Every structure is written in structure tokens, then in C-alpha cells.
Amino acid sequence: MSDSVETAAVTAVPAPATTGQSGTVVRSTVMRRLLRNPMGIASLVILGSIALLAVFAPVLAPFEENFANITKTLAPADPVNILGTDSAGRDTWSRLLFGAQLTLLSALLCAGVAIAIGLPAGLIAGYYAGKFEAVSNWVVSILMSLPGLIVLLTIRAAFGPSVWISMIAFGVLISPSYFRLTRTAVQSVRNELYVDAARVSGLSDWSIIARHIFSVVRAPIIIQTAAIAGVAIAIQSGLEFLGLGDPTKATWGVMLSEGFKNVYLTPTLLFWPALAMALTIGGLVLLGNAIRDALEDGEKIKHRKKRAAPEGAGASTTAASATARQPRKSAAAVDAGTEHHLVKVTNLGVGYPQADGSVKKVVDDVSFHVDRGEILGIVGESGSGKSQTAFSILGLLPDNARIVGGAIQFDGNYTVAPGDERVNQARLSKLRGKRISYIPQEPMSNLDPAFTIGYQLVTPMVRVLGISKEEARRRALKLLTDVGIANPERTFSAYPHEVSGGMAQRVLIAGAISCEPDLVIADEPTTALDVTVQADVLDLLRELQQRLNIGVVLVTHNFGVVADLCDRVVVMQNGRLVEEGSVRDILRNPKEQYTRTLLASMLEGKTPMSMLVSSQKEPVA
Amino acid sequence: MSTLEATQNAPLLTVDNLVVEYPSKKFRAKPFRALTDINITIGQGETLGLVGESGSGKTTLGRAVLGLAPVTGGRITFEGEDISHASRRQRRTLSRDLQVVFQDPYTSLNPALEIGDILAEPLGVQGMAQTAAKKRVKELLDQVGLPSDAIHRLPREFSGGQRQRVAIARALALSPKLIVCDEPVSALDLSTQARVLDLFLQIQKDTGVSYLFVSHDLDVVRHISHRVAVMYHGEIVEQGPAEVVTRDPEHPYTQRLLLASPVPDPDRQEQRRADRHRLLDIQRQQTEQAGALA
């Protein structure tokens, strides 16, 4: 996402009309976001007017930059010299305008030189890696270890007081910042599949870089340039302030130096160039920040609005009920006759408040229950709300999610009482890890790479069960044996990257049952695994479930997995429960059309090379 | 296999004794051997399914054919021409006949380019004029069942299945003879997968294109392939007509793979589970005996 937004920024040609039906084309919004940001618009106005003044300096300035009226030195402001004159009788306003020209141009030259060296070198080093990268890294390290100011002083001594030469030198010195920025950005997309696809198309390396790779670095380069230009102005003026500038040319630094000499006679001489520099550098820095905000922090702003919006603006249909919902302190008693269910979900609705005050429902009116020793499968496609349902039982919904209806009870007590807007964390944190545990989809990303597997198994047990470390270690080794790991001691002391995906999933299953839970929520526990490993893990889950007599909620999209493990099945589509029944009923005699369509998509038992769905003309995937 | 070769006198793609090795990062360390002694052929209008577990080298084989993996030994011949070490210029000519659809429809399309530009890219490389390219892009969108207003939209505005259709359209742009499909349906939902498989079959029927179809899913491979090759640890362990390899496999790994894939019926699955445990027991005994003999 971030690449796409970054690149979009650069194409930020003033808002082309949004194409297509959805208003999500970012190209327009980045520019708009920049303009909506007070910081962005202020800096653009300041920089724009300074640039205009510089461009039209010859027209606007009443005098030549070096025209001196000896009879009128250090004069205060009057209608002829609107900002007064300096010690040689030169007009301050005129010199300020011409100075803007030179100062801005030399800053641009500096950034230009730095880009001309750093950008291509970074692109090549990032794209090809290898020797060029190694050599340029050396060069960059040398450049960065040079003391900049001393180099600039040396160059001034060697080549004379030219602004241009010192800015070229500074551009070379500062080019590593572009090099590193570019190289890192390129490295992150070098192995993207779309670059591979371009290679297969026979695009030359240069075309690939220009078309697919350069677009990633454009936005960061723009931001970097704003900062670099500011630094260049500061450095250049600093040198000139020390008296190392070219006295025949009007620049802000030279004026500053001149003003400083007369600070006791005419303090305003110091004030005007200082103000010009402060405005320009400040404008550049703010512009860089504003562009960055427009690109990266756009999401955050939206979230803040989301949180602020719902209650007050909750005029929409669903939000109206949400406003009335107050979290309750005391746990209400569950309906009589339902206490024996391990988990009972009643008319559950989960929604996300939107910026405009409405609530986007992702789970709507879902009811089911799970008993002890029973495996319930929740089947559906991506976006059906099956994971959201599972996460609301666990109480692990994102912060901005709201329970917009219904209730969840666990072992005869509400975790979400009717009327609650959020999952009651106080009640649930006592259950989570002890009586309800979780097996995730991606085994590798759910183990912390910085700690050994043993540590990650022992710590929760010590905390939750209150046993000693020694006892926990003994139990962890036993658990690892239980989940079919041949050499538990070795796995115990291994780091996650040292074990295979199937092994990691066994470790997570061991972790899930370590505190002897009553309910396990398994979210696509075998989807990331190879088929042969999946079969082993399914065997393990079945064996453990039967031995420990636990209830399991198994979220999956695979009917084969359902057939293998589940006792009962609920089918979900678009946040709603489509059908519920025993595994045999659902798989053999599905009543709903949607379930039938899903089952018809299964390849098992189909004539090879036959069309699966095209007989019934359906909308495109 | 020999019968098929006889009927198709000149195979489109032939891979002989292919070896792919990746140089090791460590100084003077042995290179990593990803593929060992691979031999496959694909005839015109034929689909070769390539199945195996993660890390078996099936994706690497596809990438080697495309010139995206280093060929250290053996030959890859496409239409009688050795392309094992084709230059970028040769690749450009080759790309008219040899194309690719990748697994992940989210990263295989440049997020900054409009769909129309993505589809026009291979056409532009071949020097097609703008207006002709535009017309062809419209045809392609129609062929893969996407609306023509997709031209000016960005990839992120589409679902996974739709993006994969865009990727397929890009592969079809130059009417290639062979498309390497690297797990093209494994990131898709079940019903989307079915529709995309239908699309692959329909395209083959209409254009006579050949596929090298890489997948980890035996059911998918069985459904779409004429012949199937099974890969295990960088080698092809079994190869033959799809019906034979996927129903009555010979190699122990393929047998395990077949019985590991669960079927959507509780009672048949229970049967399959029992079969699988029996097979595992037999294979374990066999390896023990082999170990005892050695």
C-alpha cells in the first residue's frame, strides 16, 4: 500500500477527475490532502511568493544590486529605498530580491548535483547489487566521513569565493543521502513480481528502472530535496556570514555578514536577510513534512476522525442503536437453559464506525453454539466475516471495532452481554490463555523470532498457571512430545527460524493446549502448510481434541478439512450465517444455493478439464 | 509419455538434464542446488502440471524456463532453439511466445500503473503502435471477462480474482504459445479459483496455448493437466498422464500426497485417513528394511 501511495503522490498533477466509480484514486487525494493541511498550504504560499519575487527581481527591484549611492549610506526606510540602504548606500530591498535569485538558484544547484550523483548511483546499486553496490558503498562511507565545513573552506581557498563552486562541492558531499535513500527504496521492490513480469516481457533494464523502479523513489526524493535545499541555504549563508562569500554578488549570506558589521548602527540590515532565510528554510522544511504527512499519515488522520465521529453523528440506521448501548459493570445472567453450552453466540453483529458516522457491518446477526468436546467449523470465503466472528469470541477485535448487536456467552457467563458495545476485556482476559486459546493461521509470524521456542512456551505457563519455571519446562517438553515432535529438547532450545512451518504449527498447538483450555479457536490452522503436513496436523488436532475433550471452533475455507474434523458446520457469506447443520447434512444435502455453489467449486470428483461454473453465467470473480 | 511424444512430432518446450544452482552468500561455500537433472517436455496445446511441496523446486523450474533463475547445467529448448542462456534481446523476441502468470496477484501488478498501461506494456515492447495496442487491450479485457472501463483503473480497485484476470490478460497480450503459470489460483477463494480455472481451460480451447502449470494442489493439477510431473527435493520423482499419476501413483511421495489431500465427505475422508495411515506404516517398514539391508 505504501508504495502505491508514495508513487501516487508524484503523479500528483493537480487532481485529474476521478475515474471509475470508486473515489479511491489517490492521485487526486494526495494533492488535495497537501492543500487541506494548513502547514502545506502555508509553506506553498510562502515558497511560491519568494520564488515569484526572485523570478521578477529585475522588474521589481528599483535599483541594480550593486548600485551604490555614496551620499545615502545606512539610510532608514523612505519612499525611494523602502527598506533603507546599507553601509555602501546600496538599496536593501533590491539586494534582497537579487539575493533571493542567487540564493535559491545555488540551493537548487546543490540539490541538483546531489541528485545527479546520488540518484543514478542508488538506482544502479539497488537494482544490480553486486560489485557496483560494494564499491559505491565504500565511496559513500568515505564521503560521509569527510568533515564537510573543512572541505568547503579548502575548496574556497583553492577555487576562490564562488557560490557556485562551493555549492557544487556541497552537493557532492551531500549526495550519499540520496544514494542511500534510493538504494533502500529500490531494494524493497527489486524482487517484486511485477518487475519479474517486465523482465519476461523483454523490457530492457533501463526501461524497467525508468518505468517500474523509479516511480517508487520519486516521492521520497521530493521530500528529501525540500530538506536538502534548506540545508544548502543555511550552509551557504553560514560560509558567507563568515566573510567567505563573493562580495561582488548580492546573496542573503553576504547581506547578513554586512548587516552584522553594522548591527549597532542599523539593526534592520541584519533583520531582513535573516527573515528571508528563516521564511525560506522554514517553508522548505514544512513543505517536506506536509508532503510526508499527505503520503504516510493520511490513514491516521482518517482513524482519528473515525473515533471522533460515531456517537454524535450517529444518525444512520445502524449507529442509532449503537449510541444506546452502554457497557455494563455487572454481568447479567444468561438465558436459562443455555448455561450448558460452552460457547453461545446470539445474533452477533460486529461493525466498524466510518468517517461519515455510519457503521460498516462485517458480521450481522450470527448465532451458533459449541458444546464441550465438539468441533464446529465456520466455513466461508475471504470477507465473509468468519475470522471476525472468531476474534470476537477471543475478544481480539481491533480497537475501532464495535459490537453492534447480540451477545456472546462462555460457560454460562456473558463475555459480551446484550447491550455491550465492546468485548468485556476484564472478564475475557481471565479466560483467554487459560480456558480459551488460539491457533493462528501463519505459524511463523506468530512466534517471536527473538526468543527460543522453549521460552515462548514456558513464560505463559508460569504466568497463567502460577507454576515454577522448572515445572513449566518439564510440562513444555511433555507437550512437545505430545504434539509429535521427535526431538523435544532440540526444538525447545531452537529459535523459530530453525524449525519448519509444520513444526512451528505443532509448537503453537502445544502452546494452545499448554494451559488446558476448554475451548480452542483455530483460525485456518493448516492453510499455510503443505498438504502432507496439513494431514499430520489435522491428525494431531483430532487426537488432542478427543483426548482432552475440548470444544473447538475451526475457521476454514477448505471443505476437506471440514469433513476431516468437524461435527457441525456453519456457512457464512458477507457477514451473515447462511446455513447451519451437521457435517453430513451440509456436505451431502446443502439447502442453500450459496453452499451448493461453494461445494460445486470443489475439484474433487470432477471430470478433469470440464468447466466448473461457466454453465451458470455468473458475475466476474 | 513416449506415446504422446510420438503423436506430437516436435515438442514446444524441452528441458534436458536441467540443473539450477544458486551461489551461496558465504565465501567459497558450496552453491545451493535447487534443481537436479530435470527432464520435461511440453507439446503444443498441452498442459504439464507440476506438483510438489514448498521448497521442492517447482517454482524454480518455471522461473528457469522464463530466464529468471540461473541455469548451471543442461538445456532448455523452445521451438528448437536453445534458450538456456538467452540474452535480454532474445528474451524480447521470445516473450511473444513465452509468458507468465504469477501466484500473487497483489504483487505481480505495479500498483502505480493503470490496468491499461500494465496490459499495453508487453505490446509496447514489441513495438506495437498506440492505437493498435489500445484496441488489443480492449479485446484482452473482454477475453478475460473484465469490463472495458477497467483500463483507467488502478490494481488496488480490484479483488484478488479480478487482478489475476488482469495478470492472465497481460500474459495473453501477445498470443503466446506457452504460459508458465506459477500457482495462479492458490491465493484465490474456492469459487474464484473455479472461475479462473475455467478461464484457463477456455483460453486453451480457444487459442491452443500450452501451459506449464505449477501448483501444490493435486486436485487443481489433476483438473487442468494432460500430463503431471511430481517434484520432490529438487527432482522429478514421477511423470506421466494426469489420470495415472493422480489416481494410481507409483512413487511413495506421490502416494502420500494423494492420500493427504482431504475429501469433502466425512465418511470417505475417514476411509482416506485410514488408507493414509496404512500407507505410512507400510512405507515406514520399507524404509526400515532398506536401512537394515544397507
Image (cartoon, coloured by chain):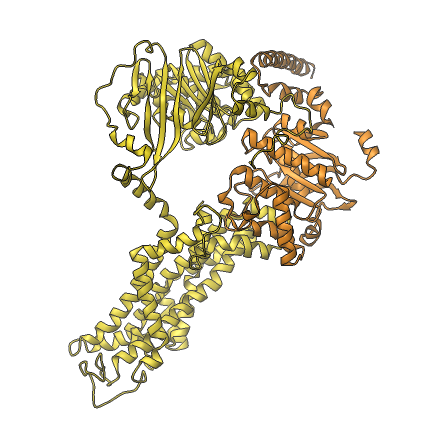
Chain colours: A yellow, B orange
Residue A354 visible within the image: yes
The residue lying toward the viewer, choosing from A389 and A83, is A389
Is A385 located above or below residue A461 in the figure?
below
Query: Percent from the top left, x then y, of residue B260?
Result: 60, 20
Query: Percent from the top left, x then y, of residue A223?
Result: 39, 57
Which residue reaches farthest left?
Answer: A264
The quarter of the picture where residue A458 lies is top left
Query: Percent from the top left, x then y, of residue A372?
Result: 40, 11
Quadrant of the rendering where the N terminus of chain A is positioned? top left
The quarter of the picture where residue A375 lies is top left
Which residue reaches farthest bottom?
Answer: A71
Taking B12 as reference, is A189 left or right?
left
Query: Percent from the top left, x then y, of residue B15?
Result: 74, 38
Residue A397 visible within the image: no
Quadrant of the rendering where the C terminus of chain A is positioned? top right
Taking A242 as reference, is B83 left or right?
right
- The residue sitting at 30% across, 42% down in the picture is A304
- Report the number of numbered marks: 0
- The residue sitting at 56% across, 42% down in the picture is B25
The residue lying toward the viewer, choosing from A63 and A177, is A63
Is A356 located above or below residue A268 in the figure?
above
Is A282 located above or below residue B222 in the figure?
below
- The residue sitting at 64% across, 43% down in the picture is B143
